Amino acid sequence: MAPLMSKDTRKVYARRIKGFWDEFSHNRIGFFGLALLSVYVVMAIFAPWLTPYDPLASTRVAESYAAPAWLKVFPQYANKPDTMEVVPKWTLTQAAGFEDKISAGKTVAGTIEMTRDAKTVDIEFTSSFNYPYLDSPQRYIAKFQWSVSNITNLYWAAELLITPPSGNTTRIWYQTNTKTPLSLGVEQDSYNYWLLQKEIGDPRATNLAQQIFSNPVSGDYHFTFHAVFVPDPPDSENTKAAFEFRNFMFFIPGLVHGILGADFLGTDVLSQVIYGSRISLAIGLMAAAISVSIGVLVGIVSGYLGGAVDEITMRIVDILLCLPFLPLLLTLVRLFGKNVFYIVLFIALFGWLGLARVVRSQILYLRETTFVECAVASGASKQYVMLKHLLPNIVPVALASLVLSVPGAVLTEAGLSFLGFGDPRVPTWGKMLNYAFGHGAFENFAWWWALPPGLAITFLSLSFVFMGFAIDEIVNPRLRRRR
């Protein structure tokens, strides 16, 4: 099989590429744009390693509107709590009738031995953690799982208590049941109204965290899990039941968090910015590549063939240029669905019109040149002339247009997402701005939420604009600087 290009042709292209790079690397604006783009590429590729949070899965990593942690250098933020995930080790303190027990580490397990002599089995185990901050958190979430098998002839009751440094014990979970198999996954937060009324007795109380984390706030806090099992009937035969308590976590959302804080859902803002670079780069590059390809193809075919083909294609371009772009784009997205693929396709379908006219004007000039006339006189087909002679002369214009088209695609996608027409399944900078505008970022002065996505869009667009100007200056002799 013959090679696609000869050795001499490869040398020519290699020399041209090297010469282009030499010109580009000495252009300060273009090189700065390339360096800036490299930062975004690194963010997009290494997003899972640059941040520990998945913005779609980790929806509560801090308190709503949590400020960036570095603001703690200012006095008003110095004592604000960071996010805490307490996973303590438990110690059995009361276990009469509790045999084969495992009490080391995060799991407490064993066998409940119920006899006629022992009317009840009382199990209690404790743990503690240190809360080092002077300001109270706004909420907490307690999670754990526990199970008891072979419990058909037992009554049971269980509770989870917390004792702050002040010594005022508060029940943060309580449940009773009768003679039913038990396998529960518990998630209890500080806004449980029933417990609020039972523990505080004030109808105006809204949050157990305000009761627990009161003065003094900092210090050691103690957990106690207490469960009681009673036979039914009381004189029943021996009963054995397997007990297990596992996966306990006490989560305190921080009032300060990370480098860029949190949004209204407590989601990490930095992770959204980093993951958003993937979508913006993908949409910008794909939409620009498709639109430039269509524009080059239409421009070459229309300019070289002329006649009816040229007339029809140019009238189609004129009609499409007269249509209102944004309302039509919103309508198409509404009809076909909020999907990244459709958004890329629609942006590309309206992005080739100007390039097609530029390429056509270049082709009208090139088809009258001597080398094209010689190729036609030598018997070259129209496809060969367009592919081998006209297309290589259009590549510099297409390359500059490709680079300059990316910012437009990125801004269009951001505008669609800001208006609520973006894909809700992916994190994008436009969606971040939409949520910030609609969910109180400005009312709560959460500038760390609204400002980063806007700056990310700005600098990404600038990187391509700088590169586009540099490329245009290199490939267009009229714009070259005198050296």
Image (tube, grey):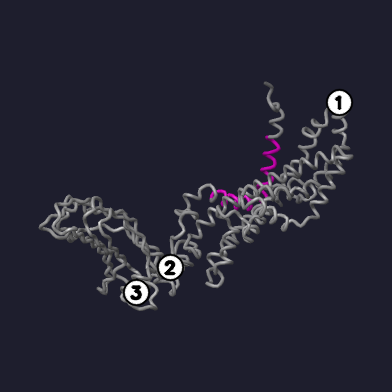
Considering the image in quadrants, where does the N terminus appear?
A: top right
Please state which of residues 390 and 92 is positioned toward the viewer in this rendering.
92
Residue 250, by quadrant, is bottom left
Residue drawn at 66 percent across, 43 percent down:
21
What stretch of residues is rendered in magenta?
14-42
Say whether marks 2 and 3 touch (CB < 8 Å).
no
430 horizontally vs 144: left or right? right
Say whether marks 1 and 2 touch (CB < 8 Å).
no
Q: Secondary structure at mark 2?
A: loop
Looking at the rendered structure, the kind of residue marked 3 is: Gln
Labels 1 and 2: the sequence-earlier one: 2
> Circle 1 sits on which residue?
378
Q: How many marks?
A: 3
Q: Secondary structure at mark 3?
A: helix
Looking at the rendered structure, the kind of residue marked 2 is: Leu
Judge depth for marks 2 and 3 and give the one in front: 3
Residue 90, by quadrant, is bottom left
Labels 1 and 3: the sequence-earlier one: 3
Q: What is the C-alpha distance between the residues marked 1 and 3? A: 96 Å
**Residue 28 seen in render:** no
Looking at the rendered structure, the kind of residue marked 1 is: Ser
Tag of residue 197: 3
